[in-house]
Amino acid sequence: MRIGNKLIYPELSYQVNGILFEVHNNLGRFCNEQQYGDALENHLKNNNITYIREYTLPPSFDRELKGRNKVDFIIEDKLLLELKAKRVIEKGDYYQTMRYLKALNKKLGIIVNFRDKLIKPKRIINSYS
């Protein structure tokens, strides 16, 4: 996605998308999110890409249960990555990713559904950052 005429993190997002396609090609479409996350983590390590896996967001209001909101991956402290393995990505999945982007003040998120026959990573931009 672009902000103005500038593409956000073009090299990093290209590299991450390549890894996503490689994971999907290797595992297929019928694994669970944890398995895709494990494979993705191995690829990130092998490519010397820094990341945080399952980062827990701080509570957003008083008495919210701790640990409710976890980002699947924060990559290079720039890009949020949300993995799904379900029939279809729903509006709630986009809202969740946008909420995480705002909470962490990050510009770009990618959401991918590995259950699809052909994956189509979706870029989500935080226009509030």
Image (cartoon, rainbow, N blue to C red):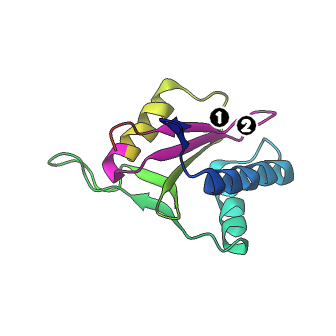
- Lower position in the chain sequence, tag 1 or tag 2: 1
| The magenta stretch spans residue 117 | yes
Write the residue at 46% across / 29% down: 92
Give the extent of the magenta segment: 102-125
Label 1 amino acid? Answer: Lys
x and y percent of residue 19 in the render?
74, 56
Labels 1 & 2 near each other (Cβ < 8 A): yes
Q: Can you say which quadrant of the picture contains the N terminus?
A: top right
Front residue of this view, candidates 70 and 19: 19
Residue 86 badge:
1
Front residue of this view, candidates 90 and 124: 124
Write the residue at 25% across / 52% down: 59
In the picture provided, is 97 more to the left or to the right than 113? left
Label 2 amino acid? Answer: Arg
In the picture provided, is 96 more to the left or to the right than 14? left
Q: Quadrant of residue 111?
A: top right
Identify the residue position indicated by label 2 in the image. Answer: 115
80 to 54, vertically: above or below = above
Badge 2 element: loop
Badge 1 element: loop
x and y percent of residue 66 in the render?
29, 56
Write the residue at 70% across / 49% down: 17
Q: Residues within 10 Å of mark 1 (few under 14, many from 20)?
A: some
Write the residue at 64% across / 41% down: 112
20 to 98, vertically: above or below = below
In the picture provided, is 87 more to the left or to the right than 21? left
Point out the residue furthest to the left here. Answer: 62
Q: Quadrant of residue 48?
A: bottom right
